[in-house]
């Protein structure tokens, strides 16, 4: 539902904004979520101004706001390993944090950022963060709809919450990546099924440790992000970061902690794994064999995750990963349009494979039937 | 059917323009609430819907449900105080219904109002609502649906 108003408004009323930069350090997941709640409330009430916050977590698994713990996480493993489970205020998928990762987030009013719809806002913030990461020497760019990637591999996932005029938009920076541990925590059967599970994830996700000859310090990563936001949005961004949480936020913290520790918060969505089965299909064509694995949301009729493999050859080489990103969380009725748009807009050459083949194998997977030879 | 910058704004409904929410008073005294087509346009394709449960009391301007689109979460703020009497099972199965039919099958919640007359006094309807939406869209820099 993109309208003519969806583009960025070029008014520059946000340019003179003065941003606080706050490094809240290493905390457990409850405390970090409560700080998110308290900061958002303080900004919404006009008790605190626009803020860039850096945060770190003890070992945690963080659900997207509308996700079900049983569907997304291996809760027994989390309990046995002392991994905290929390629900974010923001949307998107479950993520794993350990103390080596850095989280960043903007908490502000709509008027502090360029005007536009939610897609525009996501793009603006991600482009600013990507510009910051480029200062570290990695070729980070925004990938629709909400990722930052380096050469086709995700390095930062993001999500937001908008409450009236106040918003919080947050992202991660993958400093290092323990793929086997991530797979154990997340219920990621798409990868778990694959005999080459780790390689499969490594083809889609990357980290600063993988990309750089020498790992930058946490302070250097923060400073680079601040530079990116300053260059993209203008205004004043205080540096070095403050480490003292303002009183207007701390006084809201006890209530916020009580909210996120209430069982109703984590239980906001509680659906069984059976409603989210794993489906797969194989399609043999003159262009090769195409295999699709789909994490299927039976109730919502959505493809939660898609992964392609097989002996097919597609150019540009990142095209399949881009298609997977476009299809994430898409409704079955959108399949035709999304695949066609990918094929046309990205100028994909699949060497004999046509858009209808990709649609067919996904539909077969969803129906859990054997795909015919086309 | 009223229209503002290409967004349908039915003139027979009541609106909290600031929160982008509509309300319809039903014959049995309950109210139905939902997202405006303008709100849907800003949000994009909605993929999740989590309503407050039936029987829950909700204060005016507090969340009756949360929705998610493109990894953005947002509350649907109730324009009146009341008790939830129904949530939309069809929308739970297909949240995209909110985009397809925001004033019909894509309704968000039904409530039994606590004090409808007091709360409704602040809501706009008819040409007043159209003018208020025009003003809001102008302030938001919104080009149109």
Image (cartoon, coloured by chain):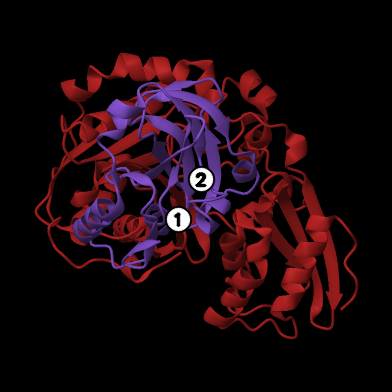
Chain colours: A red, B purple
Q: Marks 2 and 1, how far apart in space? A: 9 Å
Q: Residue at left 18%, top 55%?
A: A230
Chain bearing mark 1: A
Q: Residue at left 46%, top 17%?
A: A261
Q: Which residue is mark 2?
A: A92
A109 to the left or right of A286: left
Q: Where residue A341 is drawn, which disc sits there?
A: none
Q: Contact, CB < 8 Å: mark 2 with mark 1?
A: yes
Which of the pair B131/A300 is nearer the observer?
B131
- For residue A133, what is the image quadrant? bottom left
Residue A315 appears in the rendering:
yes
Name of the residue lying farthest toward the front: B27
Q: Where does the image place residue A274, in percent across and percent down from the top left?
A: 78, 37
Which of the pair A295/A335 is nearer the observer?
A335
Name of the residue lying farthest toward the left: A16
Q: Which residue is mark 1?
A: A146
Q: Residue at left 18%, top 23%?
A: A248
């Amino acid at each position: 539902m993109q309208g003519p108003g969806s583009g960025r408004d070029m008014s520059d009323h946000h340019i003179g904004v003065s941003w606080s930069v706050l490094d809240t350090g290493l905390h457990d997941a409850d405390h970090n979520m409560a700080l998110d709640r308290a900061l958002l409330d303080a900004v919404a009430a006009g008790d605190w101004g626009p803020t860039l916050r850096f945060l770190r977590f003890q070992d945690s698994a963080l659900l997207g706001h509308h996700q079900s713990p049983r569907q997304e996480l291996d809760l027994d493993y989390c309990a046995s390993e002392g991994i905290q489970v929390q629900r974010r205020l923001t949307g998107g998928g479950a993520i794993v944090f350990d103390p080596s990762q850095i989280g960043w987030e903007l908490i502000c009013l709509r008027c502090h950022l360029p005007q536009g719809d939610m897609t525009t806002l996501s793009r603006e913030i991600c482009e600013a963060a990507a510009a910051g990461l480029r200062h570290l020497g990695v070729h980070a760019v925004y990938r629709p709809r909400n990722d930052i990637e380096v050469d086709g591999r995700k390095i930062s996932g993001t999500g937001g919450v908008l409450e009236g005029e106040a918003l919080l938009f947050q992202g991660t920076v993958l400093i290092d990546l323990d793929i086997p541990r991530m797979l154990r925590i997340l219920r990621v059967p798409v990868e778990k099924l694959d005999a080459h599970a780790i390689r499969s994830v490594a083809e889609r996700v990357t980290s600063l440790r993988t990309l750089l000859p020498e790992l930058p310090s946490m302070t250097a990563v923060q400073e680079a992000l601040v530079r990116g936001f300053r260059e993209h949005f203008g205004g004043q961004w205080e540096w070095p970061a403050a480490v003292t949480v303002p009183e207007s936020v701390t006084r809201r913290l006890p209530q916020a902690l009580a909210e996120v520790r209430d069982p109703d918060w984590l239980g906001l969505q509680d659906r069984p794994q059976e409603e989210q089965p794993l489906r797969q299909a194989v399609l043999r064509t003159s262009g090769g064999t195409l295999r699709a694995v789909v994490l299927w949301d039976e109730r919502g009729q959505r493809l939660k995750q898609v992964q392609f493999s097989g002996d097919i050859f597609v150019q540009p080489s990142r095209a399949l990963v881009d298609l997977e990103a476009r299809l994430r969380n898409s409704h079955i009725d959108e399949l035709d349009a999304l695949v066609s748009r990918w094929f046309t807009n990205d100028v994909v050459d699949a060497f004999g494979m046509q858009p209808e083949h990709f649609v067919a194998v996904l539909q077969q997977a969803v129906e859990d039937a054997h795909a015919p030879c086309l | 059917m009223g229209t503002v910058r290409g967004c349908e704004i039915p003139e027979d409904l009541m609106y909290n323009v600031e929160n982008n929410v509509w309300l319809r008073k039903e014959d049995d005294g309950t109210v139905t609430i939902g997202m405006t087509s303008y709100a849907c346009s800003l949000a994009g394709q909605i993929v999740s819907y989590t309503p407050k449960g039936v029987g829950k009391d909700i204060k005016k301007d507090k969340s009756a449900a949360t929705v998610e689109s493109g990894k953005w979460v947002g509350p649907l703020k109730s324009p009146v105080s009341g008790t939830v009497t129904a949530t939309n099972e069809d929308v739970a199965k297909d949240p995209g219904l909110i985009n397809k039919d925001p004033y019909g099958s894509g309704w968000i919640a039904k409530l039994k109002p606590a004090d409808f007359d007091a709360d409704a006094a602040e809501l706009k309807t008819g040409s007043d609502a159209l003018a208020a939406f025009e003003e809001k869209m102008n302030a938001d820099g919104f080009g149109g649906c």
